[in-house]
Amino acid sequence: KGSNLVTVLLTLICGFVFGFPIGAKLASDFYARSLLTRRQAMILCVTANNFSMMYVFGFVLPMLFPDGSQNTKTYLVLYALPFVLSLFTLFIFREKKTEALQKNTASRFQLDMQIVDAGIISGFESLIKICGYIVLFSLASRFLSLLWTENSIIALLIKGNLEITNGITLLSQSNFPDDEPLYLFAIQFLSLGGISGIAQTASIIKPSGLSVRDYVIGKILLTVLLLVICFNINV
């Protein structure tokens, strides 16, 4: 039990600190090593697969809210709440014993340098693949922006959810009457991860046998939950 908790915490912390899509990568790798059950891995793919704090607090918020007015609220919504939700769903609502971890030689968690080294090497291989998706969807997003210059809500949703960085840039150029709709758009973009993010995650978790469909459904549900909570947090 203790080793399983360490695995979960490691996945969450690394996912939040190092950023998307490290959370999904670690969850799928730990599942492949039988250190997580399928259910645990899928939950962590959804909750730990987040944009890094450096990206959010160093790029997104300074661009949209340079006065820092949304920093605390964003920390609670994007990181604290998913962290608590992960621990709650993983350890309060446990799966049945028959669905527990497979008992084999890899089921004992040993956090040694061999595992860390293998993870780093595998991570670099995945990053090369991910860079290809980022370039592809960035070009597609720019091309769409050139063809479709309209700045309606629908246009912003489609363009912003195609590729996040371009979506945040478009969001900073929008003319909303107040900060609330601007903030909700930002949370939606960041929580869902965009089509580009889904494609990147799919390329990472498919080899382990985890479900891309379940990941997308989980991300949508989590995004809706966070948006609802945003209405009720006044920080």
Image (cartoon, rainbow, N blue to C red):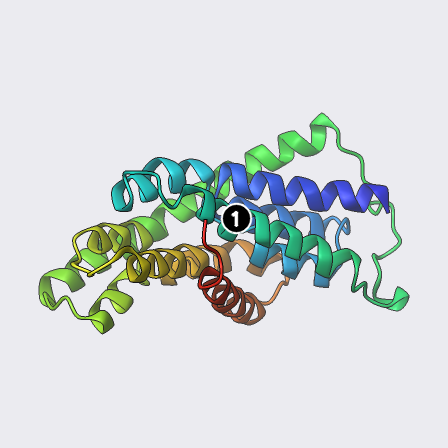
Viewer can see residue 108: no
Residue 9 vs 174, above or below: the answer is: above
- Residue 36 point in image, percent of width and height: 75, 53
User: Which residue is denoted by mark 1 in the rendering?
Assistant: 76
Q: Position of residue 229 (x, y in %)?
A: 51, 63
Q: How many marks?
A: 1
Closer-to-camera residue (216/12): 12
- The kind of residue tagged 1 is Leu
Give the SS element for disc 1.
helix
**Is residue 229 in view from this perspective?**
yes
Q: Specify whether 196 is left or right of 66.
A: right
Specify few, some or many for label 1: CA neighbours under 10 Å numbering under 14, 14-19, or 20 or more: some
Going 50% across and 60% down the picture, which residue do you hit?
Answer: 202
Rendered view: 166 above or below 150: above
Q: Position of residue 178 (x, y in %)?
A: 24, 58
Nearer to the camera, 42 or 123: 42
Percent position of residue 54, x then y: 42, 35
- Seen in the image, is 28 located left or right of residue 156? right
Q: Residue at x 73, y 43 (%)?
A: 7
- Residue placed at 33% from the left, 63% from the top? 161
Residue 196 sits in which quadrant? Answer: bottom left
Outermost front residue: 234
- 25 left or right of 137 in image: right
Residue shown at 40%/54% (left/top)?
190
In the image: residue 116, left or right of residue 167: right
- Farthest residue to the top: give it: 113
Image-quadrant location for residue 234: bottom left
Q: Taking 117 as reference, is 203 above or below it?
A: below
